[in-house]
Each structure stands twice: as structure tokens, then as C-alpha cells.
Image (cartoon, rainbow, N blue to C red):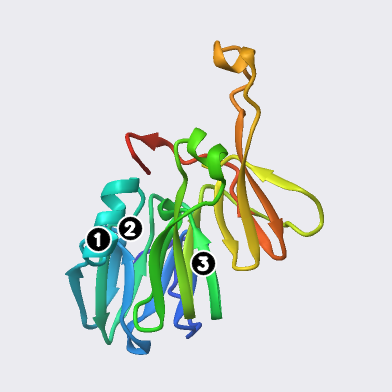
């Protein structure tokens, strides 16, 4: 007989299509339909599940990924079982889109419904200032269905209509469809010669809606993020 404090680790009995087993582990019921997940995110499954390499999500999106460094290393999953997903023990946030759109940092996307959510790669607006930042690109998710994002720690939701809002591009997780974006720069002689604060370029948010910011920054490696 094995004894221990195991009651808190038993599988959740909730039956939502995307159910948090705990804040770092997501259970997906596949009988609600196929899902697209981050490649390598599967940690376990029960029942019947089929996995298919998703590539870059089509030729057009592959070209955008090559050009921008942004994108999703995806996996298509379908079946009738229960799928458990995680990403390096990051916190998981479950959202439901109802005929709406969410713009996300590709590094933070964990999973979404394949049949009813369409995704693409989109450039953050900002004109010349955006070009100075090297160009910022994100993943758009649009339609109706469940979406799971990961965050490095517990995020904060900021109402962009309440006050002018700015954030480090690598700390931004996602924002809603009514939000407009731009790039704010603080370039001076000091920043050009290496005496700046390290916060010379931020994403500016306005309009109506919210932006989700995590208490950590994704690390930039080459042209992509992890």
C-alpha cells in the first residue's frame, strides 16, 4: 500500500473542452474536435489520440515565418481521448473567443481549437518607428472556440482605454481586437552610445480592450523567441 498526500493530484473531474488540471497543466477533451497545439507540448494522454506534424501551417504562413521569424511550431491532434499539455511548467491561461480575434506573441500560444479558430502572422503597426524596432510580428487567432496561452508567472490585464499604456515587447502576451498598437521609441545620443536604460523601445497600446502582460520577458534567440 502506498501512502502520501496524493488527493490534490488526482485528475480534475471538470468537463470543459479545455480544463485546467492545475495552473501549469491543461487537459483537452478531444471528442469536442481536433486541436492545434505547440509541438512537443504533449505530456500525456488517455484513450485514442492521433498526432500529425503541422509544419508551419501552410505555404503562405511558412513564407511569413521565414521572413519574420515569428510563427508556431504546431502539431495537429485529433481523437476521442484526453490530452494533457504543458510547456516547461509555465502558467496556463484559458480563454474563450466568441466570434472575436486575439493577437498573441507566438511564444505564448499553447493550443486552440483547429476547426473554428483561424490563425495567421501579422505585423504590429508603427510606421518608421516600427522599422527602427526591427519590425514586430505576432500571431492572430480569430473565430469561436477555446485558446490556451502560457505565461511566465501570473499575468496582469491592463485596460488600455483607462490610460496610455506601454509595455516591453517581450513581456506582452496578447491583446484584444479593439486595441491599436504602435511603437514608442526614446532614442537619444545616450541610447545610441550605449548609455540608455535598456527600455528605449516599447509597444504602445490604445483604443478599447485589454492587453495581457507577463512578469517576465521571452528570450530572443536569433530571429525567433522561446
- Please give left or right for residue 63 compared with residue 184 in the image: left
Q: Nearer the viewer, mark 3 or mark 2?
A: 2
Say which element carries label 3: helix
Residue 8 is labelled as: 3
Mark 3 and mark 1 lie on one chain; the one further toward the N terminus is 3
Q: How many marks?
A: 3
> Which of the two residues, 11 or 86, is positioned nearer the viewer here?
86
Whole-angstrom CA distance, mark 2 to mark 1, is 6 Å
Mark 2 and mark 1 lie on one chain; the one further toward the N terminus is 1
Q: Residue at x 62, y 24 (%)?
A: 187
Residue 56 is labelled as: 1
Question: Can you see residue 114?
Answer: yes
Q: Work out which quarter of the rendered image holds the N terminus and state it.
A: bottom left
The reply to whether callout 2 and callout 1 are in contact (CB within 8 Å) is: yes
Say which element carries label 2: loop
Q: Quadrant of residue 226?
A: top left
- Please give left or right for residue 187 compared with residue 93 in the image: right
Q: Is residue 165 above or below residue 114?
A: above
Residue 212, horizontal then vertical, whole percent: 62, 56
The reply to whether callout 3 and callout 1 are in contact (CB within 8 Å) is: no
Q: Label 2: how many residues lie within 10 Å, few (<14), some (14-19) or many (20+)?
A: many
- Please give left or right for residue 127 compared with residue 122 in the image: right
Can you identify the residue that label 2 sits on?
72
Amino acid at each position: 500500500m502506498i501512502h502520501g498526500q496524493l488527493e490534490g493530484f488526482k485528475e480534475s473531474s471538470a468537463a470543459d473542452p479545455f480544463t485546467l488540471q492545475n495552473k501549469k497543466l491543461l487537459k483537452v477533451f478531444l471528442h469536442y474536435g481536433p486541436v492545434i497545439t505547440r509541438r512537443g507540448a504533449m505530456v500525456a494522454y488517455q484513450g485514442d489520440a492521433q498526432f500529425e506534424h503541422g509544419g508551419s501551417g501552410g505555404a503562405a504562413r511558412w513564407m511569413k515565418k521565414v521572413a519574420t521569424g515569428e510563427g508556431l511550431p504546431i502539431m495537429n491532434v485529433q481523437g476521442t481521448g484526453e490530452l494533457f499539455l504543458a510547456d516547461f511548467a509555465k502558467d496556463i491561461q484559458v480563454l474563450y473567443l466568441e466570434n472575436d480575434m486575439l493577437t498573441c506573441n507566438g511564444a505564448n500560444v499553447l493550443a486552440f481549437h483547429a476547426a473554428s479558430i483561424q490563425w495567421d502572422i501579422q505585423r504590429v503597426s508603427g510606421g518608421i518607428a516600427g522599422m527602427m524596432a526591427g519590425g514586430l510580428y505576432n500571431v492572430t487567432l480569430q473565430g469561436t472556440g477555446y485558446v490556451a496561452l502560457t505565461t511566465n508567472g501570473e499575468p496582469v490585464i491592463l485596460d488600455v482605454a483607462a490610460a496610455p499604456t506601454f509595455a516591453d515587447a517581450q513581456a506582452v502576451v496578447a491583446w484584444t481586437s479593439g486595441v491599436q498598437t504602435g511603437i514608442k521609441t526614446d532614442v537619444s545620443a545616450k541610447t545610441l552610445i550605449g548609455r540608455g536604460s535598456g527600455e528605449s523601445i516599447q509597444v504602445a497600446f490604445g483604443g478599447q480592450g485589454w492587453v495581457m502582460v507577463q512578469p517576465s520577458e521571452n528570450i530572443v534567440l536569433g530571429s525567433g523567441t522561446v
